[in-house]
Image: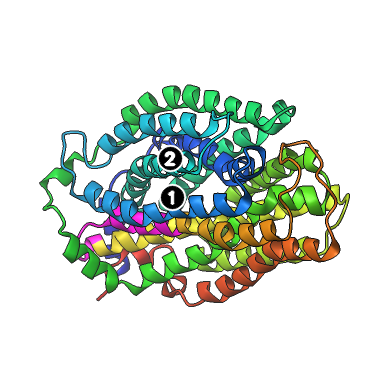
Amino acid sequence: MTQSDADRMRRDVSPKLSIWQILSYGSLMLPLSMGWVTLMMIVPTYYALDLGLGLGLVGVLFAIGRGFDIITDPTVGILTDRTRTRFGRRKPWVILGLPLFCCAVYLLLKQTDSVTPLYLLLVSCLYFFSFTICEIPQAAMGLEMSEDPHERTVLASSKTLFLILGGLIGAAAPLIWTESTSQALSNVVTLIFIVSIIVMPIYLWLMPSDIASNRLPQPKLRAALKALRGHHEIQKIIGTFFILITAKSFGGALSLLYITYVLEMPKLVGLFWIGSGLGMLVGIPLWIILSRHIGKIRTWRIATLLGICGYVALLFLGVGDKVPMFIVSLILGVSGVADSVLSVSLLADQIGRGRRQGQPEFAGLVTAIKNASSKLSITFPMLIAFPILGFIGLTEGTASIGTSLRPVETHDRVILVGFYAGIPLLLKIAAYFAIGTLAAGKSNSHESLQPKS
């Protein structure tokens, strides 16, 4: 392909998206993220300790709920690929999913009385299912909206930006209400309802409806799976993302325990979470600019190396290390945001290349598999770390934010640090080498527009 052919191809692709479309695309993540960060960092420990279910049992129940996603995610993904309506493939699912998500959040976070394991299991399954219905079509739309490699990175960054903002709002709740965890959770519920009412109509108004897709043949599940099995680059991108998100899951699920028992500063939990969020805000423009100049793969490796340095530092922090912990939180935030932005952008490159080669449309299925790997990652700290930490006695006292717990023995602290920082460190190192194997790293930002000869 000559340079003039490549230039003509870039002129013939879909027109540039407006800044309002890019922002409205990401805005849907605001209420979803508020609920997600609360679930990740507060809800398991709250149900386990404050409501008395125990760390081991809560870990198993949430793991079962996560396992439910292994079935629902691919199902919803392929159904969105096959949906044909006057509003397009993706929007009807969002219209259904967001109200259902709000109901699930209410049932999960407003519970202040004693609960049964069955209640937690059913509500968590509803929560995960409603999240799937809403987030998968939104993410699949992002893989298809642009043919420009750099704009794909910007779209992924918009989604991540609102994910961060939602996380910051969720993390700020403990700082606003510190007298009880239940009050902080109640605040999150109210905010999620308000934000959803604002975001939904704007999103539906500005997002393209991909009506032209109704003229395309509906993809068969078998054909889509066959094409995906032969697409090794997509498999490697998702596999690398899974390694990194598993590392992040250990840190997220155990951060409350680490800050309380190791640093002995439970009142500063929200501060450190906000530090991580601020680091992510700094990382978004940094990685956008860097990826445009040196490529997406090299940028992803640099970000991962930065995360490795952060987890090494966490191994050596101790009681009262407030400033070092805040700095490390910033570093991990800067590093971690690259996982979300660059993995999605690289997948969009591969989806676009496959579409030009006449492969089946399976953006929904790819998104579902990626999301299922993300959601599945939370099962590892739940199934491995929580039962062991419960066995060694980190279940006494209360997990209410702002309340100190009993001192722990040195060997117990070592075990907690190992789960919180040691395992993520090893996973980050493995991911660093895995990223280097991606063939997409050998192409510049324009080559993804060119079909293979």
Nearer to the camera, 30 or 124: 124
Q: Residue furthest right?
A: 320
Nearer to the camera, 29 or 61: 61
Looking at the image, how many numbered discs can be counted on the residues?
2
- Magenta includes 368? yes
SS of the residue at dot 1? helix
At which x and y percent is residue 241?
49, 63
Residue 127, numbered circle: 2
Nearer to the camera, 39 or 408: 408
Q: Is residue 421 above or below residue 86?
A: below
Relative side of 33 to 151, left or right: right
Mark 1 neighbour class, 10 Å CA radius: few under 14, some 14 to 19, many 20 or more: many
At which x and y percent is residue 337?
57, 53
| Region in magenta | 355-373
Q: Is residue 262 above or below residue 198?
A: below
The majority secondary structure of the magenta stretch comes to helix
Relative side of 368 to 335, left or right: left
Q: Is residue 430 above or below residue 8?
A: below
The amino acid type of the residue labelled 2 equals Tyr
At which x and y percent is residue 306?
68, 63
Q: Tell me the colour scheme of the image.
A: rainbow
The amino acid type of the residue labelled 1 equals Gly
**Is the residue under label 2 in contact with that under label 1 (CB below 8 Å)?**
yes
- Along the polypeptide, which appears first: circle 1 or circle 2? 1
Quarter of the figure with the N terminus: bottom left
What residue sits 76% from the left and 61% below the top?
Answer: 314
Q: Quadrant of residue 438?
A: bottom left
Question: Can you identify the residue that label 1 sits on?
Answer: 65
Q: Nearer the viewer, mark 1 or mark 2?
A: 1
Relative side of 77 to 69, left or right: left
